[in-house]
Image (cartoon, helix red, strand yellow):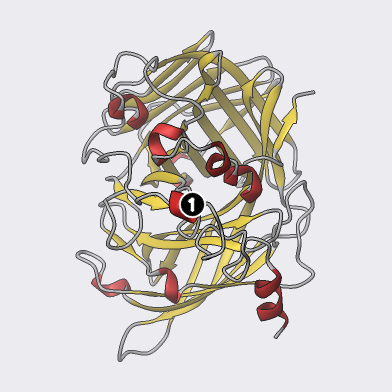
Amino acid sequence: MKGRLLRMLDPLGRFSPLNPRHRLNPLRSLVVTRKPPGDVPPLGHASLLARLYGDLDSLDLVPAPNMEWWWQTLEVKDADENEYSIISNVQIFGVPLSGWVAQGTIAVREVSSGRLWAAHTRGSFDPSDTARFTASGWRLGFQGDDYIVDVEAEDLELHLKVRLGQTAFLGDPGGKQGWYDLNPDGLVPIWASYRSRFGHRNDADSTKMRLGSRGVDLQRDTLRSRFDQQSLHFSPRDVGALSLPVLAEGVLLSPQWLWYHVRLEHDAEHVNLMLCKVINSHTGSTMKVAAAVCDDQGNAALVESSSIVFTAVKGSELRGPSKAPGKLNASFDVTKAPGLEAWAGHYELTLSANSGNDWTVRYPIVRPLCYEAQEVPITAQGWFQPEGKPRQDLTGTGTQEVLDLLKSVSLDA
């Protein structure tokens, strides 16, 4: 009853004249045709923004304020079984009036102590298939199917060569491959491309990490990697609308992303899970829910949003600028897909973070602005039930990330 009342009172809900699809809204005629900006290529790691706008040698033709990122989260243990969470990120931003910038970020967190080491730099970026970011002491990018992380900074040194599996294309079921519309009920589509790859071993001859003055020997066979290449398209050229009132909808929405990336295991078999929820952070109303499972061979099963139910456990909220649950119950149905037939069925999962286990990673935009994303190592417990078969227990580990398009922007101290 309370939930229904909140939906009725939502200032942008379907009962409100402010809703762009309400028949009393004068902007109703401006609702645009939902059409993704282009095709997501079946191979390669090149910048989709550069590819869509015709120049893989530069980003000069890409309209602002679009952005794209190559984001990797890793779990690994050292020789003494201490656990580390590592994030590497290359992000390109379209900054109105000042052009394009490329930023690199490395963050390492020692799970037991909560200590954090981080390094950032602005650098140059090759938008072709190597997706290579370079700066003084920095080299991040692809070498075949390996992703290279070579960073030497004052308080942090990291050398990894991660072998990644095949690309899984995630997106809206029945839609164009690799595309999500994050604002399906609004005037303006917020198009997001989504490709994931997963790695579970390290092929480097030598794996090194230095935290401050302390060298750390990492166990290569403990490494788990989740790698996302995503782009966000909300320029007038991408959404097909030039009206300022239409574009102002983005400010009224203030989208907040809640992502989960989890490696689920059952009887020594595993599958990779992505869950996403986008809310209007002004009102708390849900804009989008999405889920998908995929394997290391690139097979993917997209989940119909109508089957997804997210329930935050009361009293588990994490600290930070954006409200986010520390424990979430999720249920959804996975239909049969080629290569993933054994993983079709109904899922019931609880995704949990230990108290105080969250950490903040700053992603620079352009001085002095940065995004502050909340990262949370999580565990998963639950089950799935294939049709006509008994329930199968599931466990897993992963990462939760919370990012608000407006409220997560801060001045870098």
In the figure, 368 relative to 169: above or below? above
Estimate the x, y position of residue 250 in percent, counting from the top left.
58, 44
In the figure, 341 relative to 43: above or below? below
Estimate the x, y position of residue 149 in percent, counting from the top left.
46, 26
Q: In the figure, residue 233 lies in which quadrant? A: top left
In the rendered structure, which amino acid carries the disc numbered 1? Leu
Picture quarter with the N terminus: bottom right
Crowding near pointer 1: few (<14 within 10 Å), some, many (20+)? many
Q: Would you say residue 243 is visible in this rendering?
A: yes
In the figure, 65 relative to 139: above or below? below
In the figure, 399 relative to 68: above or below? below
Depth order, front residue of 340/215: 340
Picture quarter with the C terminus: top right
Q: Residue at the location (78% across, 53% down)?
A: 356
Estimate the x, y position of residue 412 in percent, counting from the top left.
75, 24
Q: Residue at the location (56% across, 63% down)?
A: 24
Q: Secondary structure at mark 1?
A: loop
Q: Would you say residue 402 is visible in this rendering?
A: no
Which residue in the structure is indicated by mark 1? Answer: 187
What is the total number of numbered labels drawn onto the structure image?
1
Depth order, front residue of 112/121: 121
Estimate the x, y position of residue 130 in percent, counting from the top left.
32, 23
Q: Residue at the location (31% across, 31% down)?
A: 45
Left or right side of 104 for 196: left
Depth order, front residue of 146/62: 62
